[in-house]
């Protein structure tokens, strides 16, 4: 391909050289971080080394797929077709999953002989720790002069609470309005996921993608007053429109995602990746023109986050005040992504030694498992995935896990849609699919029970 000569199928030396260069850069970064550290226990080097090895292995397997995706010889098959009634099947799966989580709450409360004063109180056991922040923003917006707990809520991005506020003007109520919106967004996200899956998969496997979406550990967060469901919906719409060559709409949905959660910025990756791949497939004289006429739409995406920075400025007089609050109140600042598993393992061991085994497993164990399982899934399916999805995962993983205090890796991985397609691709054989289904269901229930035990303890 003339526009991108190094990415031709025949340039195997370029691929190998690029792969080795990237591996050396990450290895040098790892050495720099830990050579300047005090002596660490052997298991710290082991856990960080294994995670970085998986990450580099994923990158090494991805490079040939990446180069092929930007080749003029890359095939662009037509989307598969669904059937009438599939939308209702998808919606039913989502609603039944939400209902199943509510039933687990009821059973768990009955078994412990613990029951709230009213049935409405049952729903409060599904509250996430961040729900109160979003509800307060919806009701009172941000503040720079109120009590400390309200001031620091500036770290939560505004689109979800704004939508809650708009609907609450009709309902006159916030708590159930926010939960209803989350459930609605999760159902719409499933419909878009199904449409996106049909771009690459036959109908039956596209429906399996929706089933893995419902069985993914942490799905219950989609029923909480949180922005995860909205973000998932907007991210999927952004990528679907990019693949359908509706570039302007893709940029708009990406901007809305970046106005919902900061990882929305990483949607630049799959959008630009798709545009470049589409450009490569054009006739020789049209490639660069096609690329230039569409690449600008991808840069609409950061405007969503810029709007959030403007909110920071209007509220506090500082465009970047959220960084200060994140550091001072949530102890979060940028850090090497591979170092995250080190301190999480340290805390897990510390909690176990102190006798807090359930918290150790439910919090730190779940965080560690989410990161290693995500990398492993993508590594096993990288050659079967759409290349833009793998590129998105790599950037998203580094962006979301590279912080000094990560408590919510399962929530971050929940909305990383390539993982759903990885499960779907891995489950092509019936036996493997059955095992993955059972494993996903078991992990989902165990994670929810650990979360529910914590909710009951602090209720």
Image (cartoon, rainbow, N blue to C red):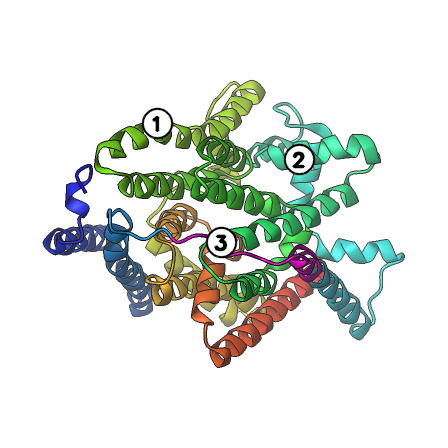
Q: Earlier in the sequence, mark 1 or mark 3?
A: 1
Of the two numbered discs 3 and 2 on the same chain, state the one appearing first in sequence. 2
Whether residue 81 appears in magenta in the rendering, the answer is: yes
User: Can you name the residue that lies furthest to the left here?
Assistant: 13
Q: Secondary structure at mark 1?
A: helix
Q: Which quadrant: the N terminus?
A: top left
Callout 2–callout 1 Cβ contact below 8 Å: no
Instruction: Look at discs 2 and 1 and give the one toward the viewer.
Output: 1
Residue 128 at least partly seen = no
Graded by Cα atoms within 10 Å as few (under 14), some (14 to 19) or many (20 or more), the crowding at tag 1 reads: few
The magenta segment: 77-94
On the image, numbered disc 2 is attached to which residue? 161
Can you give x and y, in whole percent of width and height, for residue 411 in the image? 54, 54
Q: Is residue 218 above or below residue 446?
A: above
Which residue shows up at 64% across the image and 62% down it? 451
**Label at residue 314:** none
């Amino acid at each position: 391909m003339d526009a991108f000569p190094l990415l031709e199928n025949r340039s195997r030396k370029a691929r190998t050289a690029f792969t080795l260069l990237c591996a050396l850069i990450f290895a040098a970064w790892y050495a720099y971080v830990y050579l300047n550290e005090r002596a660490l226990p052997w298991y710290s080097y082991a856990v960080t080394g294994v995670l970085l090895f998986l990450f580099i292995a994923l990158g090494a397997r991805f490079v040939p797929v990446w180069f092929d995706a930007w080749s003029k010889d890359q095939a662009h098959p037509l989307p598969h077709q669904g059937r009438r009634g599939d939308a209702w099947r998808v919606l039913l799966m989502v609603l039944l999953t939400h209902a199943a989580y509510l039933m687990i709450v009821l059973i768990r409360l009955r078994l412990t002989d613990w029951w709230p004063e009213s049935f409405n109180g049952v729903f409060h056991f599904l509250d996430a720790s961040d729900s109160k922040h979003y509800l307060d923003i919806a009701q009172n917006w941000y503040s720079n002069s109120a009590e400390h707990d309200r001031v620091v809520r500036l770290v939560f991005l505004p689109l979800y609470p704004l939508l809650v506020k708009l609907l609450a003007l009709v309902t006159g109520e916030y708590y159930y309005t926010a939960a209803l919106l989350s459930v609605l967004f999760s159902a719409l996200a499933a419909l878009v996921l199904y449409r996106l899956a049909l771009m690459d998969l036959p109908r039956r496997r596209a429906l399996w993608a929706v089933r893995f979406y419902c069985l993914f550990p942490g799905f219950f967060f989609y029923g909480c007053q949180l922005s995860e469901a909205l973000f998932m919906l907007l991210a999927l719409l952004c990528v679907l429109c990019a693949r359908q060559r509706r570039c302007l709409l893709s940029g708009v949905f990406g901007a809305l995602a970046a106005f919902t959660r900061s990882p929305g910025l990483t949607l630049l990756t799959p959008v630009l990746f798709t545009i470049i791949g589409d450009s490569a497939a054009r006739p020789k004289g049209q490639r660069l023109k096609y690329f230039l006429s569409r690449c600008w739409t991808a840069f609409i995406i950061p405007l969503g986050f810029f709007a959030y920075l403007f909110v920071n400025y209007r509220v506090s007089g500082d465009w970047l005040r959220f960084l200060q609050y994140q550091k001072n109140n949530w102890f979060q600042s940028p850090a090497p992504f591979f170092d995250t598993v080190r301190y999480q393992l340290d805390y897990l061991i510390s909690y176990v030694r102190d006798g807090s085994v359930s918290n150790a497993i439910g919090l730190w164990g779940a965080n560690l498992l989410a990161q290693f399982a995500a990398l492993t899934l993508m590594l096993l399916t990288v050659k079967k995935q759409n290349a833009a999805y793998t590129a998105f995962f790599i950037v998203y993983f580094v962006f979301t896990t590279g912080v000094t205090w990560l408590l919510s890796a399962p929530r971050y991985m929940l909305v990383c849609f390539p993982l759903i397609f990885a499960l779907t691709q891995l489950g092509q054989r019936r036996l493997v699919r059955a095992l993955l289904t059972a494993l996903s269901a078991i992990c989902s229930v165990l994670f929810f029970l650990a979360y529910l035990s914590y909710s009951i303890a602090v209720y």
